[in-house]
Amino acid sequence: MMNNDKKRDLISIADLSQEEISGLFAEAAALKAGKAAGPDRPLAGKTLAMIFQKPSTRTIVSFSVGMVQLGGHPLVLNYQELQMKRGESIADTARTLSLYADAVMVRANRHEDVCELARHASIPVINGLSDKEHPCQALADFLAIQEHKKLKSAAGLRGVKLAYLGDGNNVAHSLILGAAILGMEIAVSSPKRYEPEKEFIEKGNALAAKSGGKIIIEPDPEAAVRGADALYTDVWASMGKEDEREHRKQVFGPYQLNAGLLALAKPDAVVMHCLPAHRGEEITDEVLDGPRSIVFPQAANRLHVQKAILLRLLSKN
Ligand code: CP
Ligand code: NVA
């Protein structure tokens, strides 16, 4: 996140160090408990512009409400109505938004477009999901695990095992990188040809080598979940891949997060999902709505973590 003193972005969770993640979680926890230090409306007069190329419920609402709670202003831009949709370049859009707003959050089809926007914007850019990563989601998820395990800080996550089942997608990539930074063990279990991209596994391995973490790519879901503290899944067909949904249902069946797999994890293992869920596909109602699910606390943390991110990126600008 902290590229330099002038301009900081959050494009990948790997933009953050372990210490920075710990700091964000401490701030998020304080905000959540209503005990944050500093002024009541720290972002008064600041505007967050948000561009959505894909649908959203949690991201659009949590960023909007977060800005309002911090005293700032959320400005939701519908991509369909922007000149960018008619061919204005990303660079010119970035330069223009930088004249009016104080930060941009973007949900984009192409990760390179988020990077391009950040390169040409003089204000912070936050990745609100791309085809490669979903850093804000993963941060909320790790905070949910920290809270559930009653750990004092993100440093306590070292050695905790997360098993991710299903599509090796944007969420899986951010979880791999985040787990590696935090010194966790992450086992990813996907059908052949749907594994996480090599680039993220390699980057995860490099980060894990420094933190003491471990990245395991394990095609057998039963082996992946053994000894896990948390089981996580996401939709089998992400936004933009809807036409593959029926085909994917044929191959992803053994990776469904259900009571059978949960029984193989640690007795106190929790169930996680970033939402929205395709109930009955990647996850059963029984586990999503069951006593070991922390799916909605995860969703709730989007608000608190993003407020901490906004404070970090915006309060010094
Ligand atoms: N998890 C998540 O990002 O949800 P939305 O797509 O609803 O924003
Ligand atoms: N992998 C999913 C996440 C949605 C929050 C998608 O990209 O559609």
Image (spheres, rainbow, N blue to C red):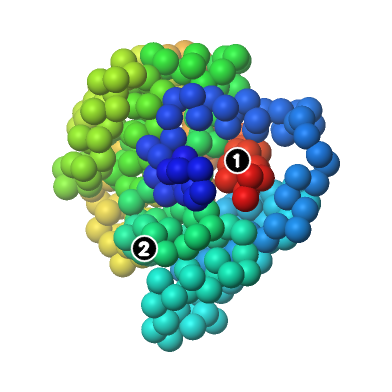
Image position of 189 (left or right of 145): left
| Quadrant of residue 115 within the rendered picture | bottom left
Residue labelled with disc 2: 116
Nearer-the-camera pick, 137 or 298: 137
Q: Position of residue 273 (x, y in %)?
A: 48, 39
Whether residue 261 appears in this view of the structure is no
Q: What is the secondary structure assignment of the residue under circle 1?
A: helix
Q: Position of residue 272 (x, y in %)?
A: 49, 34
Q: Quick check: 123 above or below 162?
A: below
Q: How far is mark 1 from mark 2, CA to CA?
A: 22 Å
Q: Residue furthest right?
A: 40
Residue at 77%, 30% (x, y): give it: 37
**Which mark is on residue 312?**
1
- Mark 1 belongs to which amino acid? Arg
Nearer-the-camera pick, 133 or 117: 117
Q: Position of residue 220 (x, y in %)?
A: 22, 29
Looking at marks 1 and 2 on the same chain, the residue that comes earlier in the sequence is marked by: 2
Q: Position of residue 317 (x, y in %)?
A: 62, 50
Q: Is mark 2 within 8 Å of ligand 2?
A: no
| Quadrant of residue 180 within the rendered picture | top left
Residue at 78%, 34% (x, y): give it: 38
Q: Quick check: 220 above or below 91?
A: above
